[in-house]
Image (tube, helix red, strand yellow):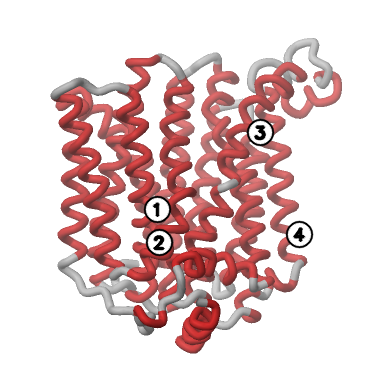
């Protein structure tokens, strides 16, 4: 797996792996610290929404600037920005005292830097690797996230007891510094086409170019709709912890085992994708993984009544994700010219991630006020559905997982029936210099 990828990519990947592990650890201890101070779940969800919301808002600006800047410098400045915010929290904690609102502001700032870092990272990978290596590299990148989910919480809980919040935050900042050093130890090739300043279109034109590119292609807009719908249905997975706790009577060890199984599945899937590289027809990997996730990751989870079943389902859904991510990313990297990837990936992120808060806002109230009461003892749906999901705590959430899983399977099957999606690999030509040259001419005409 590693021999098939150049050392320059592996050096950058290792640096980003370290920073991802550090971020996972600091996020975990920040959550612990915030819960100890507030004892309110809304404080935790607000923290996550701050991070997510600013990424969506800043992405159009980030996409344009990333396409104008050297990718290494864009990544380095983003990493250093996150490190500076982290050190700032340590300084505040040691002087005037840390308050929850400081963390919310910090999440807003780090989210803005992440909006720049992600497209720059993907763009650098595109010019470092051959088209055949895109999916394998994406599997490695997904492996980083899975390793963070597996290692960071356990390590952070130990470190938090011994070196405290400040110590963990400083370690996180150090990992970003190492990532920046590794960035400048390797050479990232310059992009094949750079738009001269005199030919550069207006900022607004550049900001909307990503949307024009996607919505100008039936295949890309079809794939984007599939990804957005799948993201919406997958986000009901935020109910997994309350489902397990409700079914087990608040058994924290059961929840921990399910979460560890999920993280292990992500690691296994990332390794598998790194070794295999995915199917030749990438879209088949995307749609098959969506279908299998609906069947084994969601329906099986909803039908389960014991931690073993939930653990298997959690493992499988996390195993499928790196393969889905790798195949999907390979399509976009091969079809979009490197000079335009920042803007196009930003547009894609806005559309796909817009489904996340919608699902978050729907899932909780739907479970608490509709499904759980309907399937509680004596509920209106018990005579019809208790054979499937039982009755009592957690039954309503189980039903939601089953419905979401069936919808996910239907989504994959329907997408395969659409030729513009099914044959995207053949219908949409690979990116070329001529494609970006046409964009330059179009931008000059519109300026």
Q: Residues within 10 Å of mark 2 (few under 14, many from 20)?
A: many
The quarter of the picture where the N terminus appears is bottom left
The residue indicated by pointer 4 is 414
The residue indicated by pointer 3 is 302
Is residue 285 shown to the viewer in this render?
Answer: yes
The residue indicated by pointer 1 is 115
Sequence-earlier tag: 4 or 3: 3
Q: Nearer the viewer, mark 4 or mark 3?
A: 4
- Point 38% across, 83% down: residue: 193
Q: Residues within 10 Å of mark 4 (few under 14, many from 20)?
A: few
- Look at the picture and state if 172 lies above or below 14: above
Element assignment for label 2: helix
State how far apart marks 4 and 2 are (Cα): 30 Å
Element assignment for label 1: helix
Residue that extends furthest to the top in the rendered view of this protein: 378
Sequence-earlier tag: 4 or 2: 2
State how far apart marks 3 and 1 are (Cα): 34 Å
- Point 77% across, 66% down: residue: 417
Q: Residues within 10 Å of mark 3 (few under 14, many from 20)?
A: many
State how far apart marks 2 and 3 are (Cα): 35 Å
State how far apart marks 4 and 1 are (Cα): 32 Å
The residue indicated by pointer 2 is 119
């Amino acid at each position: 797996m590693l021999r098939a990828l150049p050392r320059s990519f592996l050096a950058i990947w290792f640096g980003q792996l370290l920073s991802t592990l550090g971020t996972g650890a600091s996020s975990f201890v920040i959550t612990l610290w915030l819960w100890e101070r507030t004892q309110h779940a809304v404080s935790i969800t607000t923290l996550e929404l701050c991070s997510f919301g600013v990424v969506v808002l800043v992405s159009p600006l980030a996409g344009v600037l990333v396409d104008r800047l050297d990718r290494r410098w864009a990544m380095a400045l983003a990493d250093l920005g996150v490190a500076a915010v982290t050190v700032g929290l340590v300084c505040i904690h040691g002087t005037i005292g840390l308050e929850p609102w400081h963390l919310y502001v910090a999440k807003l700032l780090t989210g803005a830097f992440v909006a720049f870092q992600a497209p720059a990272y993907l763009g650098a990978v595109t010019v470092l690797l051959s088209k055949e290596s895109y999916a394998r590299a994406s599997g490695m990148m997904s492996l980083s996230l899975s390793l963070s989910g597996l290692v960071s919480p356990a390590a952070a809980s130990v470190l938090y007891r011994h070196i405290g919040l400040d110590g963990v935050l400083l370690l996180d900042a150090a990992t970003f510094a190492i990532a920046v050093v590794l960035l400048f130890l390797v050479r990232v090739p310059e992009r094949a086409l750079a738009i001269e300043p005199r030919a550069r279109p207006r900022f607004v034109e550049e900001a909307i170019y990503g949307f024009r590119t996607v919505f100008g292609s039936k295949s890309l807009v079809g794939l984007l709709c599939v990804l957005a719908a799948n993201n919406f249905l997958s986000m009901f997975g935020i109910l997994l912890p309350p489902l397990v706790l409700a079914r087990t009577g608040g058994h924290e060890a059961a929840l921990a085992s399910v979460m560890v199984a999920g993280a292990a599945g992500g690691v296994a899937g990332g390794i598998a994708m790194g070794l295999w590289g995915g199917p030749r027809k990438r879209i088949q990997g995307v749609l098959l993984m969506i279908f299998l996730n609906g069947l084994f990751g969601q329906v099986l989870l909803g039908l389960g009544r014991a931690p073993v079943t939930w653990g298997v389902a959690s493992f499988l859904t996390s195993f499928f994700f790196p393969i889905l991510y790798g195949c999907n990313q390979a399509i976009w990297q091969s079809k979009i010219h490197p000079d335009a990837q920042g803007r196009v990936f930003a547009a894609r992120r806005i559309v796909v991630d817009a489904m996340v808060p919608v699902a978050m806002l729907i899932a909780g109230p739907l479970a608490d006020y509709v499904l759980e009461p309907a399937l509680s003892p004596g509920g209106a749906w018990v005579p019809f559905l208790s054979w499937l999901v039982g009755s009592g705590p957690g039954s309503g959430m189980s039903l939601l997982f089953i419905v979401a899983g069936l919808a996910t399977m239907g989504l994959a099957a329907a997408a395969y029936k659409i030729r513009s999606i099914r044959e995207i690999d053949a219908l949409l030509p690979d990116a070329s210099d001529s494609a970006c040259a046409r964009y330059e001419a179009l931008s000059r005409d519109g300026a």
